[in-house]
Image: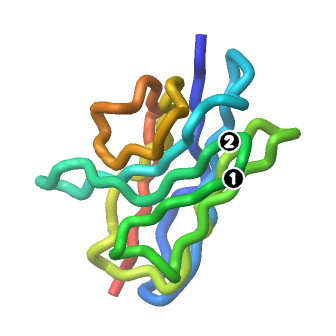
Amino acid sequence: QVLLVESGGGLVQAGGSLRLSCAASGRTFSDYVMAWFRQAPGKEREFVAAITWTSGNTHYSDSVKGRFTISRDNAKNTVYLQMTSLKPEETAVYYCAADRSGRWIYTKDSEYDYWGQGTQVTVSS
């Protein structure tokens, strides 16, 4: 059974940085695509960034491009999201997700098969 566990969330001032981690277990992820989504109160869940596990190809939403970096550590089976220049409107629960098909980087949450429990990120103004 695939298990995704996020950590690293917290409270940060606007303009600050945080690094989220997603520890993956339960199988080999070499053919997976891993992604980060976020959901703010009263809003739909939205795509943030994704990475292909084997090749390390990445894709970002326009709103975070240049400020967020997604990466993975194959040895630790962990995916990271380094967030900089955070804005108050980015306050949300951040989720790690895994797509087992691995054929394409999707931005729709319905394409992902496994989800973590989420970690809260609060950006104060």
User: In the rendered view, does 37 fall on the left or right side of 31?
Assistant: left
Q: For the residues labelled 2 and 1, say whether their Cβ atoms are less than 8 Å apart.
A: yes
As helix, strand or loop, the secondary structure at mark 1 comes to loop
Residue at the spot x=51%, y=82% of the render? 66
Q: Residue furthest top?
A: 1
Position in image of residue 121 (x %, y %): 43, 62
Give the quadrant of the N terminus.
Answer: top right
Residue at the spot x=35%, y=74% of the render? 62
Residue at the spot x=51%, y=34% of the render? 103
Which residue is tagged 2? Answer: 53
At label 2, which amino acid type do we have?
Answer: Trp
Q: Residue furthest right?
A: 75
User: In the rendered view, does 13 fall on the left or right side of 51?
Assistant: left
Position in image of residue 15 (x %, y %): 48, 89
Q: Residues within 10 Å of mark 2 (few under 14, many from 20)?
A: many
Front residue of 13/68: it is: 68
As helix, strand or loop, the secondary structure at mark 2 comes to loop
Position in image of residue 94 (x %, y %): 42, 52
Residue at the spot x=34%, y=75% of the render? 63
At label 1, which amino acid type do we have?
Answer: Gly
In the picture shown, does residue 68 fall above or below 108? below
Q: CA distance from mark 2 to mark 1?
A: 6 Å
User: In the rendered view, does 62 fall on the left or right side of 32?
Assistant: left
Q: Residues within 10 Å of mark 1 (few under 14, many from 20)?
A: some
Front residue of 9/70: it is: 70
In the picture shown, does residue 35 fall above or below 70? above
Give the tally of numbered discs. 2
Q: Residue furthest front?
A: 103
Give the quadrant of the C terminus.
Answer: bottom left
User: In the rendered view, does 42 fall on the left or right side of 98?
Assistant: left
Position in image of residue 27 (x %, y %): 70, 17
On residue 56, the disc is 1
